[in-house]
Amino acid sequence: MHPYVRVALGVMTTLTYLASILLIVGLVYEHGFTISVAEAHQLQRLYHGVWIVFLSDISLRIALEYKDTRQTFSKLTWILTFLLYLTLVPVVFHRPEVEGAIQAVWDFLNGRIYHLALLLMLSFLNLSYGLVRLLGRRTNPSLILAVSFLIIILIGTGLLMLPRSTVAGISWVDSLFISTSAVCVTGLTSVDVASTFTTTGFVIIILLIQIGGLGVMTLTSFFAMFFMGNTSLYNQLVVRDMVSSNSLNSLLSTLVYILGFTLAIEGAGMLAIWSDIHGTMGMDIHEELAFSAFHSISAFCNAGFSTLPGNLGNPLLMSGHNPFYIYISLLIILGGIGFPILVNFKDIILYHIRRFWRFLRTWEWDGRRFYHLYNLNTRIVLIVTFLLLVVGTAGIALFEWNASFAGMSVADKWTQAFFNASCPRTAGFSSVDLAGLSVQTLLIYLILMWIGGGSQSTAGGIKVNAFAVVVLNLVAVLRGTERVEVFGRELSYDSIRRSNATVVMSFGILFVFIFIISILEPKLSLLTVTFECVSAISTVGSSLNATPLLGNDSKLLVALLMFVGRVGLITLMLGIIKQKKNTKYQYPSGQIIIN
């Protein structure tokens, strides 16, 4: 390629990134503030300028490097390019005078919604592609993951401070806290969400929850690879490790499965919730659907946010809505077991469907059994999750049967026990006042919150995977065996090391933050501070009504804990600490006296 051509394309790429950012800023300003006619005219000129930049960039690429463009652009990118060129039709041709289909098409192509929706999609695609290209510069992927979450949190903070997002304004500390809680899918709130935010604010919060639940890099990688075509081999290797794909060949399909499972489960959850609340809460059909969608997303992403005063303990829900609590619990569990398990479920279901279909065609039953349908990770996560739910439900029912659940029917008590055992895994919804629970129930909450959900899920905590490995390692030590074995498999040394490191780091960070916040908040009991910190680092969102009472310094520390918990202790440390290269020599082994 000629040097001047490369320079020209590089300049256009930079202008396109700038135009993408300006378009998003312009849309935020337009919908976040009450603007004058003059400001609206200036914004329209900005959108027109962005349109020119996008047209120029794509035209130059097609004209100057058509061969490369044909290889890198996916089919969907070509479709978007064609749709962009269609915006030239109203520029070249006058509006048809005769009414009919041609005039309607002309009006649609000249419409503001069509232009802005297309430009917004192209802007997100360009920014996603630019972020993934950063991986090709050998930047530490753990650091990029942490920084991407931080950027979304800061953007969310600004959006929640917009005049149209709140009823009567909000401080920057509370806005940062709520944004961090939403992106880190925690659910801790320093203000009353129901009375503080408007419909615009709730839309921003649920978008932050969805982005945080799926993971910033999962979304950007999907857009970059699905719409923009091929990326470098190094980019694909990094993204493969982030989403735990088995191979590069299945990388895009893994990303598609993650998004597909998310939308399908959230959609099914929305319909299930709507079927239970329909006609019972004094809402019209649009408000009911919006309520159902918000809570389905919040539950699957394990966020714990609610639009109702008093969270899910609102009187409108507490009587006659047991199916609602069961649906929310199931969404929490599905979101918390992890995407690799959901993909494994898909493989198992397809295997049995193919087996049954073969039987229908041949009328010969295949008696052979495939013994490894459930991989080791799936077995461990499902068994530990089941045990924690059973023990949690039984324990909460035992200690709260005639206390917090007093006056409820037997069905209501068991439903609430199951719901309150699911929420610490790590959703943070509340149907009863947690401050009124017994000490024994709070201790059950603490252990459930600390363990959390499955790896590669929307849940937090040290993860059931790490907890199971640590317990299995402990059993192996007590039994005097050198290898840690389970289900006919030997656990890898790296899995044991990382699990032990996660547990130690979790206790270390918790001790430091509990110590500092106990100094800053002397009026709060040690149990309350501990509960708040465990809830934050495990991205649960449950609280003993202490969050609004915290000072600004304590709120910032709790927000930092939520960030650390969502990004991951190991991931964050890998991004901060310089990695040591593997050496080709070994020191003589030495023994340390233990016990």
Image (cartoon, grey):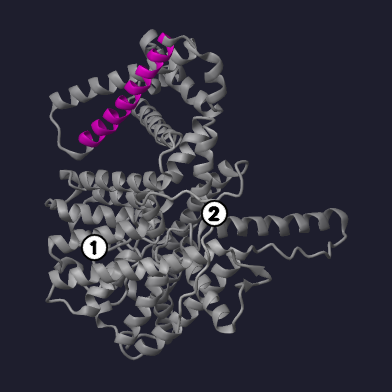
Q: Main secondary structure of the magenta part?
A: helix
Position of residue 109 measured from the top left corner of the image (x, y, whole percent): 40, 21
| Left or right of 295, for residue 465 | right
Residue 11 appears in which quarter of the rendering? Answer: top left
| Residue lying at 87% horizontally and 59% vertically, measured from the top left | 363
Provide the secondary structure element on which disc 1 rests. Answer: helix
- Give the amino acid type for the residue marked by disc 2 in the picture: Tyr
Q: Is residue 231 above or below residue 543?
A: above
Provide the secondary structure element on which disc 2 rests. Answer: loop
Circle 2 residue: 585
Position of residue 312 measured from the top left corner of the image (x, y, whole percent): 32, 69
| Left or right of 97, for residue 75 | right
| Left or right of 458, for residue 517 | left
Estimate how packed mark 2 is, as few (under 14), some (14 to 19) or many (20 or more) residues with alpha carbons within 10 Å. few
| Cα separation between marks 2 and 1 | 43 Å
> Which circle marks residue 558 in the picture?
1
Are the residues at dot 2 and dot 1 in contact (C-beta closer than 8 Å)? no
Residue numbers of the magenta segment = 4-30
Residue 139 appears in which quarter of the rendering? Answer: top left
Instruction: Name the residue furthest bottom.
Output: 402
Position of residue 573 measured from the top left corner of the image (x, y, whole percent): 37, 55
Name the residue nearer the viewer: 548 or 574. 574
- Give the amino acid type for the residue marked by disc 1 in the picture: Val
In reply to whether residue 28 is colored magenta, the answer given is yes
Name the residue nearer the viewer: 364 or 569. 569
